Structures are given as C-alpha cells and as structure tokens.
Image (cartoon, rainbow, N blue to C red):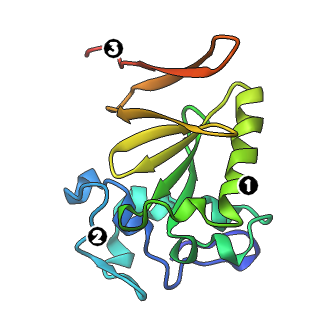
Amino acid sequence: MALGIGGRTCRTCTLCCKLFELPHLQKPAGRWCQHAKPGVGCGIHATRPGECATYACMWMMAPNLGDEWKPERARFVLSRDQVSGAMSVVVDPAQATAWRRAPYEAQIRQWAGAAISAGGQVLLMTGRKVSVILPNSEIEVGVLEAGDSIQLIHDGARFHAQVIKAAAA
C-alpha cells in the first residue's frame, strides 16, 4: 500500500487497479486487474509490478485535496504525466460523468484554465477515449497511442486540439 502526504494510504481504494493499463500483467485500461481485491487492496501487494509500486495518485500527494477527492469516493483518479506534466482525470467508464459532480467539475475547470495559461493541459480519459478539458467545455480528441501528444490551438475565438502522432520507430 502506497503512503502519501500526511500518512494517506490507498487502503480500500483500488480504482487505479481498474482504470490503468498494466502491460506487465496484460491488463487493459478500464478492466479490473486480476489481482485487485476491490475494497480490500492488492492480492499480490508484496510482488506487484514496479509501475504499481511507484504509482501515487494526486489525492495521495496533494494536501489541498480533501477526502472527497479520494478515487474510490470521486470515481476518478487524478494523475500527472511525468513526461508532459499534463494533468489527467481518469474516469471510471462505469461512471463516466462522475467528474461533473460538485465540487469536482468547477475545480477541474479552474485547473484547466490555469494549465492553459501556463501552456499545459488537463486531459479527461474515459477508457481509451481522451478529451481536453477547457474552462467552459471539452474537446474530444479520440484515442491516443503511446507517445502521441496534443497541441491546443486558439484561433482568436475558440480552442482546437491537434493530435501530434509519435514518430514511427
């Protein structure tokens, strides 16, 4: 069990075990890991893959996020991409609109506005489908492949998103 700021622990929360792809375990995004014990924890905690052992969601690490932001309660996981710095709101496909409930949507849209001002992004991920969250709307981008990125373009009136495909190996 990961240990976060102020002694926060995953404990009963296993939502990341459902939402994220785990290639080492041949687990696709949006499906429960075969080792997850929802409401209990990881069945292979002592020998779990490194990507699981080192992962900590934003709720674990951000002292300004209250208990209502714990993924098992919110029904989404907040993450920060280590390469791009983009924030991701990874939503449980079974409750795809959970992020729209109060107090989440207003705060997420504030973060989106701040991110855009700083040249960043807040992404909404539902299964493999990706959208960019804007202060007042979203732009659906579709499915991204590993290494793809999104460029936001403002034409003076509104934003558009362009997918930059990863260079072929």
Which residue: 77% across, 37% down?
114
- Determine crowd level at label 1: few under 14, some 14-19, many 20+ residues with C-alpha closer than 10 A: some
Q: Residues within 10 Å of mark 3 (few under 14, many from 20)?
A: few
Between the C-alphas of marks 1 and 3, the distance is: 35 Å
* Residue 68, image x, y percentages: 67, 75
Question: Residue 54's x, y, as percent?
Answer: 50, 59
Residues at circles 1 and 3 in contact by the CB criterion of under 8 Å? no
Please tell me which of labels 3 and 2 falls first in the chain: 2
Instruction: Tell me the quarter of the picture where residue 142 sits.
Output: top left
Q: Which residue is mark 3?
A: 167
Mark 3: which secondary structure?
loop
Report the front residue among 44 and 143: 143
Mark 1: amino acid: Gln
Above-or-below relation of 156 to 57: above
Which mark sits nearer the N-terminus, 1 or 3? 1
Q: Find residue 56 and report its horizontal and vertical position in percent.
A: 56, 61
Q: Is residue 66 visible?
A: yes
Does 113 sit above or below residue 11? above
Can you identify the residue that label 2 sits on?
32
- 123 over 36 or under it: above or below: above
Left or right, 95 with respect to 122, comes to: left
Relative image position of residue 85 (x, y in whole percent)? 61, 36
**Badge 3 amino acid:** Ala
Judging from the image, what secondary structure is the residue with disc 2 in? loop
Which residue is depicted at the point 46% across and 58% down? 91
Q: Nearer the viewer, mark 1 or mark 2?
A: 1
Q: Residue at x 42, y 67 (%)?
A: 95
